[in-house]
Image (spheres, rainbow, N blue to C red):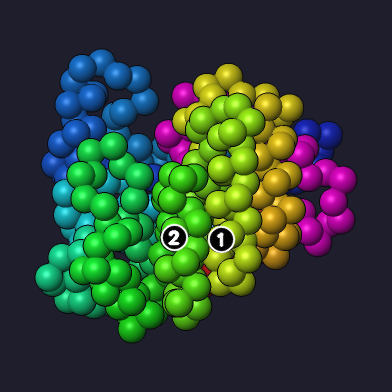
């Protein structure tokens, strides 16, 4: 994917553990189709070739597709697998698939997904606006969550800051399930009170050694973010989880509306430029590859 020269001839080689590949012709994303038809920008197809084109000079050594809220998680995982195999260059090497852990057939669904060689984990977002169930308090969902260990799957945790302490209480009882907190814990709200809620929840999760954090998604919370506006959140996440359990991610193409791919990764690299080389390497690549077993 290019020479990797980002600025001053310095190469930036990354693992991107949070990208979305979707193809609306699959009919797996009816809500996205409606948004596209309504003229919303950035909603159309996003293929592996689009990701490769967006990367520009950034060398993406590895990547993980994270489910894009399909109507059928197994069909999506199979489709992305087929696309990756047909592309012939490996990306994405990992898949975080969708599954409803509260369903009666959760065990069978996880078995089918774990049989796919690129599937590494499951995401079922707990903070979706259209989710009417309180999954975190649902005993069926909690039972389904425990099945992840049986199938050797991790969990991508997308949750509102107000619920992170509650999630931490659950995760304390399941140290056998690796967890990646999505989008730095969703710090969308601003102000001191919101900061305190987010920070307390973040620290509660960071106290658990099997929980990691993906630092990403700032374009969803602040379209015109700057280094200075995201610096407190990035530094707080790294301080809480350490350079061994934090990883940067693009959240492309969702964050494409806020930053192009090279400038996004240049910003991340600039924020940690004062760290030692080994720490920078872990945040930009090694931690993600280790967590997702790439």
Whole-angstrom CA distance, mark 2 to mark 1, is: 8 Å
Residue that badge 2 annotates? 167
| Residue 291, percent from left and from top | 55, 68
- Callout 2 environment at 10 Å: few (<14), some (14 to 19), or many (20+)? some
Where does the magenta region start and end?
251-280
Q: Residue sitting at 20 percent across and 44 percent down?
A: 132
Image marks 2 and 1: residues in contact by CB distance under 8 Å:
yes
Report the front residue among 271 and 37: 271
Q: Quadrant of residue 278?
A: bottom right
User: Height in image: 125 above or below 29?
Assistant: below
Residue 74 makes an appearance in the image? yes
Looking at the image, tell me whether mark 2 or mark 1 is earlier in sequence order. 2
| Residue 73, percent from left and from top | 22, 57
Q: Residue furthest front?
A: 193
Q: Residue sitting at 73 percent across and 27 percent down?
A: 228
User: Height in image: 16 above or below 102?
Assistant: above
Q: Residue furthest top?
A: 39
Q: Quadrant of residue 35?
A: top left
Q: Residue sitting at 51 percent across and 30 percent down?
A: 189
Residue 250 makes an appearance in the image? no
Q: Please tell me the numbered disc located at residue 205.
A: 1
| Residue 1, percent from left and from top | 58, 46
- Callout 1 environment at 10 Å: few (<14), some (14 to 19), or many (20+)? many
Q: Residue sitting at 85 percent across and 51 percent down?
A: 275
């Amino acid at each position: 994917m290019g020479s990797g020269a980002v600025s001053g001839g310095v190469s930036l080689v990354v693992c991107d553990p949070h990208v979305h590949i979707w193809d609306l012709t699959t009919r797996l994303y009816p809500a996205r189709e409606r948004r596209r038809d309504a003229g919303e920008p950035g909603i159309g197809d996003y293929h592996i070739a689009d990701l490769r084109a967006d990367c520009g000079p950034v060398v993406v050594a590895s990547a993980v597709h994270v489910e894009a809220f399909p109507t059928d998680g197994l069909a999506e995982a199979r489709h992305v697998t087929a696309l990756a195999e047909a592309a012939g260059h490996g990306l994405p090497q990992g898949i975080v698939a969708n599954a409803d852990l509260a369903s009666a057939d959760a065990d069978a669904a996880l078995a089918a997904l774990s049989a796919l060689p690129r599937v590494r984990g499951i995401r079922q977002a707990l903070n979706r606006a259209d989710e009417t169930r309180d999954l975190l308090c649902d005993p069926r969902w909690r039972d389904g969550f425990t099945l992840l260990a049986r199938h050797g799957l991790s969990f991508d945790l997308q949750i509102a800051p107000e619920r992170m302490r509650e999630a931490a209480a659950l995760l304390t009882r399941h140290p056998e399930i690796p967890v990646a907190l999505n989008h730095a814990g969703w710090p969308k709200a601003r102000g001191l009170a919101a900061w305190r809620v987010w920070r307390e929840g973040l620290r509660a999760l960071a106290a658990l050694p099997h929980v990691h954090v993906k630092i990403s998604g700032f374009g969803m919370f602040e379209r015109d973010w700057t280094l200075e506006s995201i610096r407190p959140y990035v530094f707080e996440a790294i301080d809480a989880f350490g350079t061994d359990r934090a990883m940067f991610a693009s959240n492309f193409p969702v964050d494409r509306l806020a930053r192009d791919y090279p400038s996004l990764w240049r910003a991340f690299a600039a924020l940690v430029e004062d760290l030692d080389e080994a720490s920078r390497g872990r945040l930009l690549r090694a931690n993600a590859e280790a967590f997702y077993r790439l």
